[in-house]
Amino acid sequence: MTRLLDTGLSGTGATGTGPFDFELLDPHLRTLQRYVRTEAPALRAAAREVDRHPDGSTLYPQVPLLDRLATLQIPGPYAGDPLIVEGREYPLLSAMERVVFHEEAAAHGDASILLCAPGSLTAGMLVAALGDEAQQARFFTTLRSAPAWTFLAMTEPQGGSDATALRTTLEPAPGGDGFLLTGTKRFIGNAHRARTGVVTVRTGPGPLGIRCALVDTDVPGVTAAPIDTLGMRGALGAIAFDRVPIPAENLLGGHLPATRRGMWGWLHSFNLLRCVAAAMAVGLARAVHDHLAAHGLAPARLAPLAARIHRVRALTHHAAGAVDADPATAHLPAAAKTAAAELAEHTTARALELLGPGARLEHPLLDKWARDAHGFDPMEGTAHVQALTVFASLRR
Ligand SMILES: Cc1cc2nc3c(=O)[nH]c(=O)nc-3n(C[C@H](O)[C@H](O)[C@H](O)COP(=O)(O)OP(=O)(O)OC[C@H]3O[C@@H](n4cnc5c(N)ncnc54)[C@H](O)[C@@H]3O)c2cc1C
């Protein structure tokens, strides 16, 4: 919140480069915003290529901004070279820096390509929250040396909203040497590309029986394949484990008190991840708005869309500031993610309406964004789940 200087709709921005330049951000974040804005356009061509050929399971779009992102978001002692822009350092660890980066990359590049990117984002959050020193060193050291994909596998074929209903098991291996992992996960970002990731598992009954394990995919018993989706194509995969041997040292959280070993870690991580998902959805809406403006739609006709984008953007920045102040803040990220997912769907639908019949054919990028927009509701939990989070959080 301290970085949020103005949530109004009246500013035109000191840089004067666009309607979304308001005095919303402090100088540190504005410098990051300018950097990403310059680099992001290269993402768009790569995103369209992935959209056309989503089954390239090892395909990695070579875009400098994604390479750079891949070795950021790595905590303290394991961090590689920070991003330095105009003498300022950006490790991209705070919610606010991540939000500005992802929103701008989506607004001037593409949101869905960010989900295909290598790096530590979702899995890294869990390893940072639950990993001991050796686990963190192993996971992050490989990431900082070269771009590599990771995944966080929670959702299962029977449903993802109720994370406590998971069926994937981690049982002691015969002979007492480590564990055996058995189960199936679906809709997992980059599961078909990554060599390592975090899998949520059941080790016993009840909430304390839910844990997270580091899993390498180049071992017998692991099968992974891309999932063909309508939007955010190329991002998601399914991954199955058939009695996969997992060394004991891969079980995360053993050094923590029993109540903090499993769900606690991911509940906290979700607060930040929801801010990032909201930022990407806001960025997508901004991209659509700018596309309409570039195709001659008068500012007056775009004003209601712009106003809604500004409101959701302000809420997202407010949520990120609140999470940076207190990582346990749950209601603001949940509200922002819900509003931003609705915004992305509304903006793309309205754009297709404004451009008239044939818009999907004449504006392939808009067609892609309209398909992508529907990915934001399920991502990090549907609107129903966010509503439950807001309610529980406010009641507390
Ligand atoms: C782009 C994208 C990226 C993703 N990335 C990942 C990832 O990296 N890792 C991962 O593990 N998962 C990932 N997911 C999966 C996502 O987390 C799930 O889709 C989501 O949690 C919903 O689960 P489900 O699809 O199984 O729906 P279900 O849980 O089966 O829900 C079906 C419907 O029931 C509703 N519902 C469920 N429970 C309740 C309730 N208690 N009250 C009211 N309504 C309810 C839901 O809102 C939904 O409308 C991703 C999804 C997308 C689209």
Image (cartoon, grey):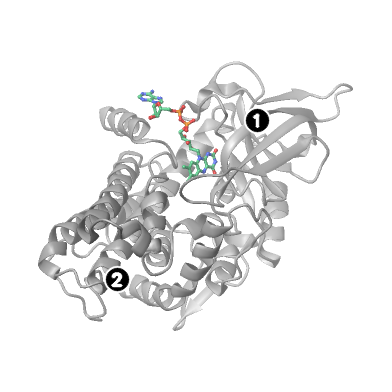
Res 25 quadrant in image = bottom left
- The residue drawn where x is 74% and y is 38% is 223
Q: Is residue 314 at least partly visible in the picture?
A: no
Q: What kind of element bears circle 2?
A: loop
- The residue drawn where x is 30% and y is 44% is 332
- The residue drawn where x is 56% and y is 56% is 116
The residue to which callout 2 is attached is 26
Q: Please state the total of marks drawn on the protein image.
A: 2
* Quadrant assignment for the C terminus: top left
The residue to which callout 1 is attached is 184
The amino acid type of the residue labelled 2 equals Asp
Quadrant containing ligand 1 = top left
Q: Give the residue at the far front of this rendering.
A: 358
User: How far apart are the alpha carbons under marks 2 and 1?
Assistant: 44 Å
Q: Is residue 64 above or below residue 72?
A: below
Q: Position of residue 368 (x, y in %)?
A: 41, 56
Left or right for 136, reference 165:
right
